[in-house]
Amino acid sequence: MGIVKINDELHEEVRKASAVMVRSINAQAEFWMKIGMLAEANPTLSFTDIVREQLKQADVDVEGQTRATG
C-alpha cells in the first residue's frame, strides 16, 4: 500500500462523491483510478460497458437483475 498525493480540490470532490456512493474516501479514489485505467486500456468502451464487464468477471448476474427489474 502506498500514499498518493492529490490536490485539495480533487480530494474534496472524492470526499463528496464517496458520501453519495456510500464508499470510503479511499474506496472512491480507488474506484475512479481503476475505471480510469480500464478506460485508457479500452477507449472504445463506455463507462457502463466497463462496469458491466467488471461485474461479469466477478460473476455477478447482471443480466438476471436486468430482467427481474424490467
Image: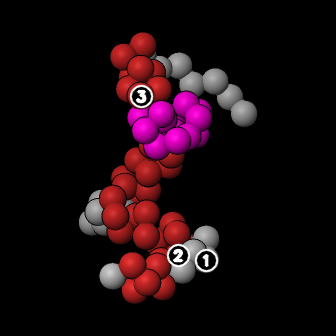
Whether residue 33 is visible to the viewer of this picture, yes or no, is: no
Amino acid beneath label 3: Lys
Query: Dot 2: what SS?
Result: helix
Which quadrant holds residue 10? top left
Residue 56 is tagged as 2
Q: Residue at x 48, y 35 (%)?
A: 18
Label ID, residue 59 = 1
Residue matched to label 3 = 16
The CA span between labels 2 and 1 is: 5 Å
Residue 61 in percent (x, y) is at: 54, 80
Label whose residue precedes the other's in the sequence (3 or 1):
3
Circle 3 crowding by C-alpha within 10 Å: few under 14, some 14–19, many from 20: few
Q: Residue 12: which numbered mark, if any?
A: none
Is residue 23 something one can see in this rendering? Answer: yes
Say what secondary structure mark 3 lies in.
helix
What segment carries the magenta color?
17-30
- Mark 2: give few (<14), some (14-19) or many (20+) Cα within 10 Å: few
Placement of 11 over or under 69, stated as above or below: above
- Asked if 7 appears above or below 69 in the picture, the reply is above
Name the element at disc 1: loop
User: Looking at the image, do the residues carrying marks 2 and 1 touch, with CB atoms under 8 Å apart?
Assistant: yes
Give the mark nearer the N terminus: 2 vs 3: 3
Please name whichever residue, 61 or 20, is drawn nearer the observer in this view of the structure: 20
